Image (spheres, coloured by chain):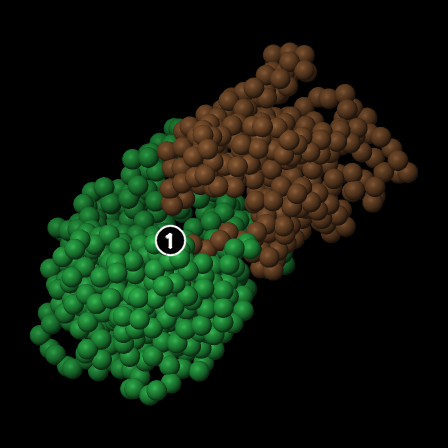
């Protein structure tokens, strides 16, 4: 079904020059191709990674002017010029991203807008290089017929590259960061770095399209690269359907052809664009392509490779600690206050390399705060946290995760846009994403690595009894299974230490029993050390080797389950009984 | 020269600050904003022009009618482009307000025309000369009105009952809602007030700049830059940033070139954000885990 649609599209694009010699039609079709290239790249940033850019006309401009200057002043060939255009745009993109992606939301929008305006300003002002407001003329222009093929080829290659990227570890990392940057960081991914890469890739695509644009037209001038152009790019992507490989094609066709059909309404062009944007926000939140393909069919026909060849999974990381008497994790007098309220005060805690350590306490006792401090989301005001004698307090969450600390969250944070298998694959891969270029071109070794990752993910899911769900999107899972998926994903990192934040919350009694058995099995089969924050006392008492009780941010008791159960301070904290 | 640049810089800067305050007001109440705030400035200028010059109304009536219309436009925008996406994680409100802005620009082109026109004012008929520097009385009026309004908005938030309610919404919408504050109405008021301030800026600027359908975008962007530099959740930061931006811009244009003005202005924005990611006086939102 999907392949038929792609085939028709390719046939239409390919046969157009056979039917018409009218250069106008070819030019319009080539414009569709250019817009497809830009929006495919933008899709990586907006659709996959969930970041916004209102400045991509700037990268388009950089590509166009790089190609124009190199072909006219330096006398390079078009091919070489476009290659450089891509590199320059991507490099500038990386730089802008480094500054822009430290902030989010409106702040990010501002940086991208500012970038676009600065580029536009430089094009006008730097007359000696850019030709000023008049731009650069006499760019050696190939014949439209020949160049039509180049642009259509470029558009097809762009779609293929993005499709490859989506299936790679990078693609999953993008969607993971979009789904939950907090969870992505807990698996060792630096959300900042992943976003920078998405931004860089999208800038490279815009640069390529810009270079082709310069050669197609034979001239460039600043008028083509305004804020409106950036908005048009975004509109084409959203109208077509962000996050889907085919979205940019549909959006580019619609946004290029519509104004051409309605030339008599040229005065109403902005109303048309604005109206289209409003319509797509109101009625087509997943774009034309999203509305046409109901989620779950065409999107899921990837990864049909059989699991026939079994080379033993040899990916080794996460050196499990083999015994030793020194504690794995040592918390010393850690204190943390929020606006004068002490959430943790001088908490001291030692977690051995084996076994399950429970942390209990009434609501607001600081249990989750403690987990957040252990995993790097909060930095203690004072005191130390050492993992195998390495001080970790103050390190970012992804760095602590890379030292072998994995965690789950109070409200399960699954990556909703990814399938269940892909969720686990994010955990298996962790920070090892490989080269983004190899991922784009689908290099053989990345495919082999992919197959390994997938086998490992499927094996882990089978162990956890989630086999029937593997291809379903993670946000389709019922709440209990989401929690289980989250645990499987965390364990896929082969951590030394697993932090569980209320894994039994909201589970049915039968599910709690399963969880109980699962944790016991984990402990008995040489799994990682576990810190368990939990309210269900039955579960805590059944599985824990050691219990620490927090109240008002202080450790009020610590010991074996039996000792804690009879501790008068604990009874008082829980029941409010005073002597 | 310096006096002239100072006057121009403070006049424009106070307007950027006033418009930027509009971003701040809606941002703190609803975590959304009108990305086409500049188009509201344009609407203010165009509507005032239509009543004053087109229909020949007396100035006070034209201004009053303009302000009523602008507040209504702001409320209408909130209803159409923001409320459906209120507190949705997606930036749909960002795009829908941009869409409304470009539609408004097109409507202005169709009704007002594509050319810029001068807005007649007694305050711009002959320049005041001070030691070789020339400027218009209007340029003195602008910052006075602008700063008074900014102060007035602050007083409204800190001294009046309803202002305090709006501040409570900004501080913690859930708790404010539980205390019986009608949040949708608060957001509606914020949008009305925000557009009103932009409209006033439009009316004040009309005699100095020319009135044109396309005048909104760049004013809106600069005001946005000011809001970001000052810190979206800090009204004092925005006022300071507004004046600062106006002065930098005026002096760069005076001593370098008008072309360099935009490049340096917006480069400054990026620089500030690199050093202080949440603005000069803004505070970082708490990370939720």
In this picture, residue B97 sits left or right of residue B270 = left
Q: What x and y, as percent, mark residue B52? A: 64, 16
Badge 1: chain ID: A
Colour in which chain B is shown? brown
Residue placed farthest to the front in the image? A579
Percent across and percent down for residue A291 are 23, 41
User: Of A375 and B3, which appears nearest the observer?
Assistant: A375
B154 and B16: which one is in front? B154
Residue hosting label 1: A576
User: Is A369 above or below relative to A456?
Assistant: above
Q: Position of residue A87 (x, y in %)?
A: 45, 67
Tell whether A249 sits left or right of B57.
Answer: left
Task: Name the quadrant of the N terminus of chain B.
Answer: top right
Which of the two residues, A502 or A542, is positioned nearer the viewer here? A542
Q: Residue at x 21, y 54 (%)?
A: A507
Q: Which chain is green?
A: A
User: Residue at 55% across / 24% down in the picture?
Assistant: B70
């Amino acid at each position: 079904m999907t392949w038929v649609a792609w085939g028709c599209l390719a046939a239409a694009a390919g046969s157009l020059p056979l039917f018409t010699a009218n250069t106008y039609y070819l030019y319009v079709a080539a414009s569709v191709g250019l817009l497809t290239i830009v929006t495919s790249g933008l899709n990586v940033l907006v659709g996959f990674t969930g970041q916004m850019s209102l400045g991509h006309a700037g990268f388009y401009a950089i590509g166009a002017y790089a190609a124009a200057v190199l072909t006219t002043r330096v006398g390079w060939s078009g091919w070489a010029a476009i290659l450089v255009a891509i590199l320059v745009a991507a490099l500038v993109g990386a730089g802008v991203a480094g500054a822009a992606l430290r902030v989010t939301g409106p702040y990010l929008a501002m940086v991208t807008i500012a970038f676009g305006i600065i580029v536009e300003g430089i094009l006008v002002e730097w007359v000696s290089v850019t030709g000023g407001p008049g731009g650069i003329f006499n760019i050696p222009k190939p014949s439209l017929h020949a160049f039509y093929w180049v642009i259509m080829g470029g558009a097809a290659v762009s779609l293929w590259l993005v499709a490859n990227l989506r299936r790679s570890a990078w693609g999953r990392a993008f969607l993971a960061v979009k789904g939950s940057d907090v969870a992505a960081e807990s698996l060792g991914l630096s959300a900042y770095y992943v976003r920078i890469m998405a931004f860089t890739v999208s800038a490279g695509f815009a640069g390529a399209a810009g270079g082709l644009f310069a050669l197609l037209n034979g001239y460039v001038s600043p008028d083509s690269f305004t804020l409106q152009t950036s908005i048009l790019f975004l509109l084409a992507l959203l109208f077509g359907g962000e996050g889907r490989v085919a979205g940019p094609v549909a959006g580019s066709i619609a946004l290029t052809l519509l104004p051409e059909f309605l030339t008599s309404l040229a005065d109403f062009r902005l109303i048309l664009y604005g109206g289209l944007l409003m319509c797509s926000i109101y009625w087509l939140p997943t774009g034309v392509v999203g509305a046409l393909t109901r989620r779950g069919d065409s999107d899921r026909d990837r990864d049909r490779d059989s699991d026939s060849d079994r080379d033993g999974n040899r990916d080794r990381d996460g050196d499990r600690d083999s015994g030793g008497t020194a504690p794995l994790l040592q918390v010393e007098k850690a204190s943390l206050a929020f606006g004068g309220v002490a959430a943790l005060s001088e908490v001291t805690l030692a977690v051995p390399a084996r076994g399950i350590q429970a942390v209990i306490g009434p609501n607001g006792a600081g249990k989750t705060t403690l987990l957040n401090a252990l995993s790097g989301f909060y930095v203690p005001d004072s005191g130390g946290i050492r993992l195998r004698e390495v001080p970790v307090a103050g390190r970012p969450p992804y760095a602590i995760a890379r030292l072998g600390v994995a965690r789950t969250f109070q409200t399960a944070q699954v990556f909703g846009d990814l399938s269940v298998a892909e969720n686990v694959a994010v955990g298996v891969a962790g920070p090892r994403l490989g080269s983004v270029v190899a991922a784009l071109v689908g290099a053989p070794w990345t495919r082999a690595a992919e197959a390994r990752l997938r086998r490992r993910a499927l094996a882990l899911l089978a162990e956890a009894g989630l086999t029937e769900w593997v291809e379903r999107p993670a946000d389709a899972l019922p709440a209990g299974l989401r929690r289980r998926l989250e645990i499987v994903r965390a364990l896929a990192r082969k951590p030394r230490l697993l932090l569980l934040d209320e894994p039994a919350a909201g589970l049915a009694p039968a599910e709690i029993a399963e969880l109980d058995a699962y944790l016991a099995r984990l402990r008995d089969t040489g799994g990682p050390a576990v810190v368990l924050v939990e309210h269900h006392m039955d579960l805590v008492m059944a599985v824990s080797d050691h219990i620490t009780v927090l109240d008002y941010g202080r450790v009020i008791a610590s010991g074996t389950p039996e000792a804690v159960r009879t501790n008068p301070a604990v009874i008082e904290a829980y029941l409010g009984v005073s002597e | 020269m310096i006096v002239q640049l100072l006057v121009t810089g403070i006049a424009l800067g106070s307007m950027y600050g006033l418009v930027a305050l509009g971003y701040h007001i809606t941002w703190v109440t609803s975590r959304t904003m009108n990305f086409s705030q500049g188009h509201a400035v344009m609407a203010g200028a165009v509507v005032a022009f239509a009543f004053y010059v087109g229909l020949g109304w007396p100035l006070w009536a034209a201004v009053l009618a303009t302000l009523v219309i602008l507040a209504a436009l702001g409320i209408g925008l909130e209803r159409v482009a923001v409320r459906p996406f209120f507190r949705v994680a997606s930036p749909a409100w960002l795009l829908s307000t941009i869409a409304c802005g470009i539609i408004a620009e097109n409507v202005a082109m169709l009704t007002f025309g594509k050319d810029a026109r001068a807005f007649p004012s007694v305050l711009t008929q002959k320049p005041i000369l001070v030691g070789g520097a020339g400027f218009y009385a209007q340029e003195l009026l602008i910052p006075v009105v602008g700063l008074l309004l900014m102060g007035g908005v602050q007083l409204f938030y800190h001294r009046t009952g309803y202002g305090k309610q709006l501040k409570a919404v900004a501080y913690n919408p859930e708790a404010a809602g539980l205390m019986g504050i009608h949040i949708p109405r608060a957001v509606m008021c914020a949008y009305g007030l925000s557009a009103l301030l932009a409209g006033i800026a439009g009316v004040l600027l009309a005699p100095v700049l020319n009135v044109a359908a396309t005048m909104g975008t760049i004013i809106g962007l600069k005001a946005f830059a000011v809001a970001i530099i000052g810190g979206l959740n800090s009204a004092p930061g925005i006022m300071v940033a507004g004046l600062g931006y106006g002065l930098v811009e005026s002096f760069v244009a005076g001593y370098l070139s008008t072309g360099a003005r935009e490049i340096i202005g917006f480069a400054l924005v990026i620089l500030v954000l690199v050093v202080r990611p949440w603005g000069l006086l803004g505070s970082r939102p708490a990370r939720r885990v």
